[in-house]
Every structure is written in C-alpha cells, then in structure tokens.
Image (tube, grey):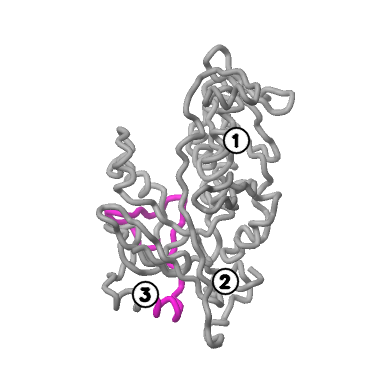
Amino acid sequence: MDAFDYVIVGAGSAGCVLANRLSEDPRCEVLLLEAGPRDTHFWIHVPLGYGKLFAKSALNWGYESEPEPALNGRRIFTPRGKVLGGSSSINGLVYIRGQPQDYDGWGVLGWDFASLLPYFRKAEDHCLGESAWHGAGGPLAVSALGRHALCDAFISSANALGIARNDDFNGAAQEGAGYYHATTRNARRCSTAVGYLRPAEKRPNLQVRTGTLATRIVFQERKAIGVQIGDRVLKARREVVVCGGAFNSPQLLQLSGIGPRALLERHAIAVLQEAPVGEGLQDQAVGVIHECHAKDEAEHEHGARNPLGRRTGRSSHSIYASHGYCQIGLGQAIVSQGLQSFLGMRFPFIPKDAAHESI
C-alpha cells in the first residue's frame, strides 16, 4: 500500500514522537520514513559509547558547516543522527530544555514557556518524580547521573566562587553549578525510538520504513499530497509531516521548491513558494580545554560487568555529567551563569576516566 493518512519524513527526535501520537487513533494509517537503519548498533544503547558513533557514516550524516568567518574560516563538524531516533540516538544524552526566556522571546502564540511546560511534563518519566516542573510516567526517561569525586570538586570550586549549587537545571532556574540529568533508563539510552516508537510499532496502523530517503514533497497545485522516493510517490491523504531536523527539513523543503528564490534558481529548482527557509540557524560554539592530572584513581575504575546492565559503572554514564551554567558544564558537571535575564556561557566538566581515549 502506497497511500496513508499521514506520511512522516524523518524518524528522529520529532518523527518518533509524532508516529506514536498520530497512530494512537486506530482509524489513522501512518507511515514513518527514515533514511538510515534501525537502531540496533550496540553502542547506541550504551551511554558512554556515543563518541564511537560520530565516525559511523551509516548512522550519522556527518555534516560540516560552511567556512565560519568568525572562526578563521574553519569548517565545524556537525553530527546529525541518521538512524531510528535521529540525533537522540547518537547525542550526549544531556537533558536540558532551554531557558524560559528563549521561548518567551520568540513572541509566538502558544510557544511561550508557560504554554510548553505541560508538554515537557507529559513527556517525562523523571527521576525526581512529579512536580510543578517535572512529570512522571511519560515515555522519555530522565535519570540522575552517578557522582564522581572530580565532579564534586569542580562543583565545590564553583560554589566557592559564589556560584550557587543547582541540582535541577530544568527546574526553577538554570543558573548555578551541579550535575546534569540524562535521558537514560536502567543504564541504557532512552532515545525517542526507545521511548516513543518501540511501543507504537506494535500497532497495525503504523508502518516504519528504514533505508528510505525522501527527495521531494509532491504538490498538487499548492497542497502537499505525497513524498517522492526514487521513482515512486508515497501518497498522503491528510498530511505530509516534515521531521528531518534543523538541517534536513529545510533541505527537503528547498528541494521541493520552497525557499529563497535566488538559491532555488541557482540549482534549477522551480520556485513553488519563496520563503526564508534554511536561514537564521543558530548553534552554540564549543571550545575544549584538555585536562592535566596527576594519577588515575582506582576507586573510579569500577565498571559494570555488563555495560547494558543496571549497575552504575563508567559505561552507564554519559561523557557529559556535571554542569555549571556562568554556565560550567559539557560533562558530568556543569556551571551556568546568566547575563542579565539570559545565560551567556556554559562550562562543562568531563572527568578523565570517563572521556577515555578509546571513546
């Protein structure tokens, strides 16, 4: 069958959620398309293993930026998931929502933080339990990371400098120093493929097709009626839902004739609708300072015998652990600190025994 009520392009962080929600209605036939494979690779599900996935072209689009003028013309490696779960299957598992001021600053009706908070709570199965800030029993597991002596020292140092302790960067405030939470359950990654798609795949009204690259949205006049896959068209009776992410969604729209006129004409693409699609992308800059240390500490060499088990050894941790929002954190611990009402910098901390060279 090549006609469905909904055709979802991209089985990543958004696509898996929509496949779950739309297929809740047994009257709706839903097709979920993914260019990459199923998420069966061993290292996807071991939190510490995500560093091994960056060079896996079968699972990662492996994009590079254009030469960046502010970075002396360097191109920046930009990994994006090419697998069920998308980037939620290959990322560093850090669970950070973003600042309320960011959402409020958009000025878009229904997208302010107060309107979005119920949906954040609905998604969560949070280790802190249900509260005004968090939900319990949702599809996305959010867990605390194990403590580490070096991370504790990092956080204490931030406290000594006047940066307050923060045990929940998705709570009342994001400023402070403390440990991240991570999208894991029982020492395994909880991607959207695991949390949302796996339960939904049991439904007879949902089809999932991997290894299927959409090259164009097909329009009838100005209505989207399907998706081009090679020489075939998969038809959508109700909607085509584009969930390719920050890079692939605008790319697909541009290939379909929706985007800046000059760009489309330069590539001989007929203009269906001129629009600033693909413009205004913002990303965070990251700098790395490598550590020096006197010795390895034996007490941190404990590890789970089975890295997919329930123990809390090194393999069950994300490399990202503590966090300070000045901000400090791109590791197990982080520090965060605000500039006026907006956070300006984040300083993460990665203990050496977690960021091992082989990872």
How many other residues sit within 10 Å of disc 1, few (<14), some (14-19) or many (≥20)? many
Q: Nearer the viewer, mark 1 or mark 2?
A: 2
How many other residues sit within 10 Å of disc 3, few (<14), some (14-19) or many (≥20)? many
Comparing 159 with 7, the one in front is 159
Q: Is residue 139 left or right of residue 85?
A: left
Q: Return the disc, 3 or 2, that comes first in the chain's sequence.
A: 3
Helix, strand or loop status at disc 3: helix
Residue matched to label 1: 32
Q: Residue furthest right?
A: 231
Residue matched to label 2: 355
Q: CA distance from mark 1 to mark 2?
A: 35 Å
Give the residue type at disc 1.
Leu
Asked if residue 44 can be seen in this view, the reply is: yes
Query: Taking 4 as reference, is 48 above or below it?
Result: below
Q: CA distance from mark 3 to mark 1?
A: 43 Å
Q: Return the disc, 3 or 1, that comes first in the chain's sequence.
A: 1
Q: Which residues are magenta?
A: 127-155
**Residue 39: where, in percent of width, then height?**
64, 51
Q: Is residue 298 left or right of residue 94?
A: right
Give the residue type at disc 2.
Ala
Is 42 within the magenta? no
Residue matched to label 3: 155
